[in-house]
Image (cartoon, helix red, strand yellow):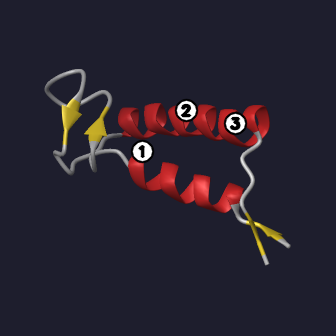
Amino acid sequence: MADWGPVAIAVVLFVLLSPGLLFQIPGRRRVVEFGNMETSGASILVHSIIYFGLITIFLIAIGVHIYTG
C-alpha cells in the first residue's frame, strides 16, 4: 500500500499558495492582492512560511493519509 496523503497535500498547497496565482501577501500596492500574477522576494518568503506551517499541521499534527492499492 502506498501512502499518497503527503504527496496530495503538498501538491494542492503548492498550487494554492503560489504567490500571485490566487493571492499575494504582501502585495506591491496593498497588503493583500488577488490574482495579479506578480511576485516579489517578500511574498515568496511569506508564502513559504505559510506553506511550511500548513504542511506541518496537515502531515504531522493531523496525520492525513490516503492509501491506494
Amino acid carrying label 3: it is Thr
Circle 3 is placed at which residue position?
56
Q: Residue at x 86, y 73 (%)?
A: 1
Labels 1 & 2 near each other (Cβ < 8 A): no
Q: Residue at x 19, y 38 (%)?
A: 34
3D distance between C-alphas at marks 1 and 2: 10 Å
Q: Is residue 26 above or below residue 18?
A: above
Report which quarter residue 49 is drawn in: top right
SS for callout 3: helix
Discs 2/3, front:
3
Circle 1 is placed at which residue position?
17
Give the class, few, some or many, for how many residues have Cα within 10 Å of label 3's Cα (few <14, many ≥20).
Answer: few
The answer to which of marks 1 and 2 sits earlier in the sequence is: 1
Q: Which mark is residue 49?
A: 2
Could you say which is closer to the camera, residue 51 or residue 61? 61
Provide residue 65's location: percent of width, then percent of height: 75, 53
Give the class, few, some or many, for how many residues have Cα within 10 Å of label 2's Cα (few <14, many ≥20).
Answer: few
Labels 2 & 3 near each other (Cβ < 8 A): no
Q: Is residue 55 above or below residue 27?
A: below
Provide residue 59's location: percent of width, then percent of height: 73, 43
Provide residue 54's location: percent of width, then percent of height: 59, 35
Amino acid carrying label 2: it is Ile
